[in-house]
Image: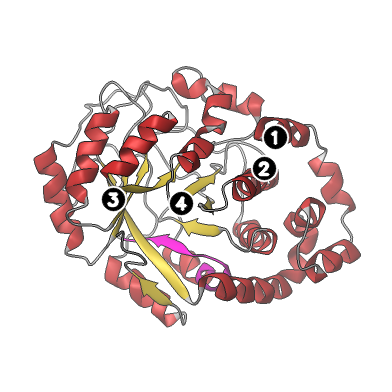
């Protein structure tokens, strides 16, 4: 079954009805299974699983150490531009928001890179708004080639591209792709993406597969929590990740759980994934997808991030700035979202070590 058929099959499922009927036996059976299936995963996502969080956490810790060791990879984002042709109602970069847009020159990219490199960071994630006209693939490729002088790992979070364009970026030095569906609820998707290329739900849904087909070492996906019913979004994200894992066995598939923070435009989250449900979702992810990476950004509060480290997290951002540039000068640009964990790279690394894990700045070298 292709991913479109799979998503449509589950879009009609009665999640609320299922969750209301989950029993203690269902959760105990799910915990006992070495390879939980979709029904087990739903039971572990349900509020009824709250009584079993400690047991879930113990099993999740063991699975994470078995597959990833006691290490957490660090990365840092660099925003290259904030031009965007979409009108996403929840994003600070939306084309409907009126502010002076900016885009880094190659000299400015290098200046930011030099500042970031001083922190010891080796993995950098570059981001743009979704405007192919203002930040064409060739501009991104030039930026990647420059950044590879400073960082052995460069990944991208930009507008969706075709497979051959991703292959071109891989040759330039890109090794990873982050692309969020934002919401798997097709009706909500149309409302929050009223215009622009991003309005094409199906094209975006196929984007992670195009990145895997291009040969990226890892692909990171997820939903933006706040747009639609959160437990349904968590389930659909994991089903998407499992489909990609099964089809692209040489690509590490990872999941993120970004919760909406304040952004320009005044959009308020319609749904809340509270802290307890957030923890439960991470644990359920690990039990259902033991080989999947789980990425945690600075959208989350510092003290909360620290508590999540032993529960299945494999990659964490630090020292983040969500404005264009901003590492070499004080930027007045509008941020894409507000950062909640403002600690330095060194402070985040110490917090990881205090939890008994090793902060890893570089986990591979290309030959």
| Residue at x-position 32% and y-position 39% | 169
* Image mark for residue 337: none
Label 4 element class: strand
Q: Which residue is mark 3?
A: 321
User: Residue 122 sits in which quadrant?
Assistant: bottom left
The front one of 97 and 242 is 242
Q: Is residue 94 left or right of residue 314?
A: left
Magenta region: 308-318
Q: 79 or 301, which lies in front?
A: 79
**Residue 33's spot in the image, x, y percent?**
80, 67
**In the image, which disc is placed on residue 236?**
2
For mark 1, give the secondary structure.
Answer: helix
Q: CA distance from mark 1 to mark 4?
A: 22 Å
Query: Residue 240 appears at what percent x and percent y?
Result: 63, 43
- Closer to the camera: disc 3 or disc 4? 4
Q: Do the CB atoms of the residues marked 3 and 4 lie less than 8 Å apart?
A: no
Please give left or right for residue 61 compared with residue 198 in the image. right
| Discs 3/1, front | 1
Q: CA distance from mark 3 to mark 2?
A: 29 Å
Q: Quadrant of the C terminus?
A: bottom left
Can you say whether 89 is above or below 299 in the image? above
Tell me which numbered mark, 3 or 2, is placed earlier along the sequence: 2
Residue assigned mark 1? 7
- Report whether 74 appears left or right of 257: left
């Amino acid at each position: 079954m292709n991913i479109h058929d799979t998503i449509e099959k589950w879009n009609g499922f009665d999640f609320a009805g299922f969750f209301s009927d989950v029993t203690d036996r269902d959760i105990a059976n799910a915990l006992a299974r070495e390879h939980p299936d979709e029904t087990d995963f739903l039971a572990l996502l349900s509020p009824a699983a709250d009584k079993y969080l400690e047991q879930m956490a113990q099993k999740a810790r063991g699975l994470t150490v078995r597959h990833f060791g006691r290490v957490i990879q660090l990365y840092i984002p660099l925003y290259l531009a904030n031009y965007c042709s979409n009108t996403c109602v929840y994003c600070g970069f939306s084309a409907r928001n009126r502010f002076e847009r900016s885009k880094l020159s190659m000299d400015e990219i290098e200046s930011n890179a030099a500042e970031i490199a001083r922190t010891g960071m080796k993995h950098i994630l570059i981001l743009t708004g979704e405007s192919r006209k203002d930040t064409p693939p060739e501009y991104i490729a030039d930026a990647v080639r420059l950044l590879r002088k400073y960082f052995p790992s460069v990944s991208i979070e930009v507008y969706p591209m075709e497979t051959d364009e991703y292959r071109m970026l891989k040759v330039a030095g890109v090794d990873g792709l982050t692309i969020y569906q934002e919401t798997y609820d097709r009706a909500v998707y149309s409302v929050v993406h009223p215009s622009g290329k991003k309005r094409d739900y199906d094209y975006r849904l196929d984007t992670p597969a195009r990145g895997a087909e291009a040969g990226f070492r890892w692909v990171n996906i997820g939903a933006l929590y706040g747009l639609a019913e959160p437990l349904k979004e968590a389930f659909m994200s994991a089903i998407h990740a499992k489909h990609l894992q099964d089809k692209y066995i040489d690509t590490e598939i990872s999941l993120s759980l970004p919760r909406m923070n304040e952004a320009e435009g005044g959009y308020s989250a319609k749904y809340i994934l509270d802290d307890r449900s957030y923890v439960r979702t991470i644990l359920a992810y690990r039990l259902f997808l033991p080989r999947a990476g789980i990425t945690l950004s600075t959208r989350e509060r510092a003290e909360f991030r620290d508590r999540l480290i032993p529960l299945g997290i494999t990659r964490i951002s630090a020292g983040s700035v969500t404005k264009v540039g901003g590492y070499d000068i004080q930027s007045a640009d509008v941020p894409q979202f507000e950062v909640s964990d403002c600690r330095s790279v060194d402070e985040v690394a110490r917090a990881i070590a205090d939890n008994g894990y090793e902060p890893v700045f570089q986990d591979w070298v290309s030959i």
